[in-house]
Each structure stands twice: as structure tokens, then as C-alpha cells.
Image: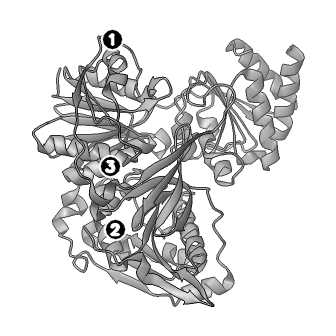
Amino acid sequence: MVEFHSPAAWEIGHKGRKLTAMKVAVCVKQIPDPADPGALDEATKCLKRDTKLILDESDSYGVEMALQLVDAAGGGEVVLISMAPNSEVNGLRTALAMGADQAILVSDDALAGSDALGTAKVLAAAIQRAEPDLVLAATESSDGYTGTVPEQIAEIMGLPSVTFAKSIVAADGSVNVQRQTEAGYDDVTCPLPCLVSVTAGVVEPRYPSFKGIMAAKSKPVDEVTIADLGIDAGSVGWAGAGQEIVAVEEAPAREAGEIIEDDGEAYQRIVSFLDELKVI
Amino acid sequence: MSVGTIWVLAEAAEGGVASITNEMLAKARQLSDDVVAVFGGDGAAIAEQVGAHGAGSVLATGDLGGALPGPSIAGAMAAAIAGGAAPAAILIGTTYSGRDVAGRLSVKLDAPVITNIVDLADEGGLVGTEPIFGGASNVKTKFTSDKPGIFLIRPKSFEAEATGGGAAAVNALEVPDLGATGTAVVTNSFVEASEGPKLDEAAVVVSGGRGLGESDKYELIESLASKLGAAPGASRAIVDAGWVPYSYQVGQTGKVVKPDVYIAAGISGATQHLVGMKGSKTIIAINKDAEAPIFGVADLGIVGDVHKVLPQLLEALAARG
């Protein structure tokens, strides 16, 4: 369990209105550019991350949501939380340029090979340093897409959580969330502090302004190791993974299909094809 | 042929249990003689259905009183395991609540989750298969500890065949005190109205992507879907752009579909999308970029402009009546 300060402690006055400032931690992942096809390292069976990493687009929604929530609360702070090899800050600078205030980056060679649970342990410990009212994360990353890290972080920190949020409104020490469901959505109420995972596409992430990009260069990035976080190297990385890849195999390829260039009549081939398939 | 007891997380859906539940039960009973459905709700309500699909018994929490189900179910499972229950594997569907259960349970047991699984086999211990790079390669993973193996299973991975078994015996599963982690409460549920067949059950799916150019042009997709009795779908790009709701999304995030016929219009075929539709029986793709990856999986590929081909196609179909 992690002790949090009470959200009420952030209450400030401004021009006679009582406003509650909000501290939001946003988990952001820095990933290889998805436009480049990925590859596995032969020896380690890990995703190769030898190019410059960028901000996972999925996380830009959480950053935007955090900025809007802090704005709506009348003040506060957005702290980015990231774990990446080689002290990578390229993606963090993008989110700082959007308006986030500071970042905590965990970079440590011992983290190579960490699975989702190991990653969640590290991120939870880093988030604890920020003591936020609210933790935001994407529902899943665009490269690993396990989709379990947000809920694992919440459980490690002893926090309630709402995953797959379409919208978040914070008021009176709790959040009201529209949560995606199979059939539509649920209204969910959850007391702060808590964790919410944000579905992509629910807000329009702002483009960093020139001023924002310049300001981002001097915003603080607190780089820490797992020792700083009090984490045992044996519980993360390869040692802590608890699973083993036994094989990587080429999947059988689909047989090549019929490809035709549209000469203005190609639609007729679709009609005859649908006819053959008895769809029409 | 048995790997030991397998727990299958049962989820409710309109008219009974979700299809993913029946799919996992079918796989579980191939691997084990002792298949138990675990349910966050009234066990009697699903006993007949899960019994017919191969579960010998149901462990049920009873009504959760509006709490978000994930923490309660994970807490109850962990308490049962601490009390001596020893499932060899726990199969959980890759659904909204399923991922919550898997994440919470993983921490409680200090055990990893093997995710995005499309196949499971007993190779002296359970080995899960996960497709990567849009299905170009398969990674096979097993657990290295003797803790229960938590597997998150993708929908539509297995055929949901009934066995004709009788109603499963219902046993109580106690939810322990969850402290703060159990405080998220559902206050209202909304069902988004949708016409026509459901996306993940339709025999024909017509999906549109960024190649449509602008949101108004999604009408072409809806018209074609309506003409073919199909469900309309979308790539993540246009869902993110706000053209259509998230419930339309086909892909890694979103729905996995395996219709008889899948028509992709203006979709390039990013990994994200291919993962969700590659299992379709027949794929028709229309895209103006001849190099688009979607043509790599298409049975019929038209290299052309969707703004020309779709209206022509609609006209031709209308002329047929």
C-alpha cells in the first residue's frame, strides 16, 4: 500500500472561488516508430529498440486528458512517468512540449527483458514518488499491447481503478468515468486517488507549440535507477519474468490473391466475386 | 490428457454467457478433465449453459452489488487459491473486464500473464501461442513457475462447441474485503443502439479507413453494409479521428472478427488492423496504394480509388435489386 496525501490538501483560493488543484501522473511509453516494421532480437527474443524512441501515440490521449483535468481543476501539475532503456527522453520531450510539467524516467540496464508485471512494479514505485491524486495510462501500448500494466499498477499501489475510459470528470474527491463496454458504456464513480486507463481517440491531443517545444527543453526530468526506487533487480528484468519463450515461428502465409488495377470496371469483378461467394 | 484443473472466467452477455466464455470452455475441456467456470454473479443463471459447454462446476461470487467486477473476481480467485485451490491454468478472455481480472490477479499471485493468446497446447506444461507483427510470426510462451498460469485469450480463437453436458454444479466463491481497490462502482449502464448484425458475429463485414478521406464518406461504408446485410466496421485511424464510435473498431484494440467475407475499403492494413481481421474466410480490399499491406492478405484486391469504386459498386448492386 502507498500512502497518498489527501486531495483536499491541494485546495487553493483564487479570486474568491475555491478551486482544487490536481496532481496527475501519466504513464507514457517511448516506443520504436510504428512506421518502421519491428523485429525481434535473435538472441534475447525481445523487441529491438536500437533506434530513437518516440512517444507512443496511445499515450498522447492520456497526456491531453491530464492537461484538461488540471485545467478544469484550476491548477495542479502533470507528471510523466516512463521506463525506457538508455536514458531515452525523446518521447518525454514531446509530452513535455504538449504542456506536462515534469517527468520521472526509470532507466536501468537491469530492466532489460522485463515483462508486464515487472514493468508495473517499476512504474508503481516511480508513481509513488510523485504522490498524485490521479494516475492515467493508455489502455495498452502500441508495441507490446499486453494491456495489463495499468491494472497491475493499480493493484500494486492498492488503488481502485477504472479502465477503458471514454471521458473523465473529476469533482469532490472522486472521478466520474464513462467506461467502454461491449454493448455501450457504463457510468462509473471512483474515489481519488485512483488509476484510470484512457481509450485512444477520446480527446484531441494538442500539437506542441513552438513555445512549448522550447520550454520542454528546460523542464525537469528526474532520472532514477531501480535501486533509487528500492526495487530488487531479481524481481524485474529477465530474472523476474516468470515466463519463457520456447519458440518463435513464421506463421503460414495466406495464399496470394487476385490483385487487379482499377480500369473503371473493377467494381464488376467485386460483384461477380460476391456472386461466387453467394453473398448476393 | 489432463494438465490439471483449468478455471475459465465466465462473463455474462445478452441472453447468457459471452461467446468468448464458450470458446474457452471448449479449449479447456480438450486439455483437462476438470474444467471449472468462475463467475462474478449468480451461478445458477449460467449453470446450464456452461455445463452444456463442458464446465463440471461453477464457482460464483453472487451479485457484486454494482462494484466493477475486476477487483472482486480477482480478489475472490486469489483468496480461493490461498485457501488451497490449485488450478493449473486460468483462462481469461481479452475483454474489458477480463483484462482487469488478469492484471489484478497477476499481482496478487505475483505471477505473470501470458497475453494475446490464440492457441494453447499441452507440451509438458501449457504453451500459449501469440501472433506478433500482425500475425507474420507466432511466439510460443510457457510459464517457468508452478503458480497458476494466467492466460489472456483472444476472442474467436477456438470453436465454441457444446458437449450436451448437464447443468454445472454451483459452488460459492467468497469475495474478501478489498479495501480501497473495490470502491469503483457502476452507477448506470448504457446500451448504444445499433442496427443490423453485430460486428463480431456478422457473416459479412464492411470496414472503412483513412483512405475514405473525410468522415462524410463513411456513408459509403454504411450503404454497402446495409445492402449486403453486413456489419459496418472501421480501422483505428478513423475511430481515433472521431468519425465513428470505438465500438466499430476492428483490430488489436477493438474487435476481432472472423466473418465469411471481409471488405476493407481505404484501409492500408497496419498490424493493428490485420490482427483483428486476418482470420476472415475471404478478404476483399480496395486501396489506391498497390504497396499497401492489406493486399498481402486479400483474396481479391482492387488497386483503385474507393471514391470511384464504392459508388460504382453500390449502383451495380442497386441495379440487381
Question: Where is the N terminus of chain A found, in terms of image quarters?
Answer: bottom left
Looking at the picture, how far across and down is residue B131, in whole percent?
Answer: 42, 40
Amino acid identity at mark 2? Leu
Q: Quadrant of residue A169?
A: bottom right
Where in the figure is residue B34, as x and y percent of width and height?
Answer: 19, 23
Tell me the subunit letter for badge 1.
B
Identify whether A17 is placed above or below B62.
Answer: below
Instruction: Decide if residue B137 is on the left or right side of residue B170.
Output: right
**Label 2: which residue?**
A123
Q: Which label lies toward us, 3 or 1?
A: 3
Badge 3: chain ID: B
Regarding mark 3 in the picture, which secondary structure is present there?
helix
Residue found at x 45% / y 69%: A173
Residue A3's disc is none
Question: SS class of the residue under badge 1?
Answer: loop
Which of the pair A176/A150 is nearer the observer? A176
In the displayed structure, does residue B251 sit left or right of residue B231? left
Decide which of A54, A130 is in the foreground and name it.
A130
Name, please, the residue furthest toward the left: B84
Which sits in the foreground, B150 or A218? B150
The C terminus of chain A: image quadrant: top right
Q: Looking at the picture, which amino acid does disc 1 mark?
A: Thr
Residue at numbered disc 1: B163
Q: Is residue A115 visible?
A: no
| Of residues B223 and B74, the one drawn nearer to the viewer in this rendering | B74
Disc 3 versus disc 1: distance between alpha carbons? 31 Å
Label 1 Cα neighbours within 10 Å, binned few <14 / some 14-19 / many ≥20: some
Discs 3/2, front: 3
Question: Residue beneath label 3, please?
Answer: B71
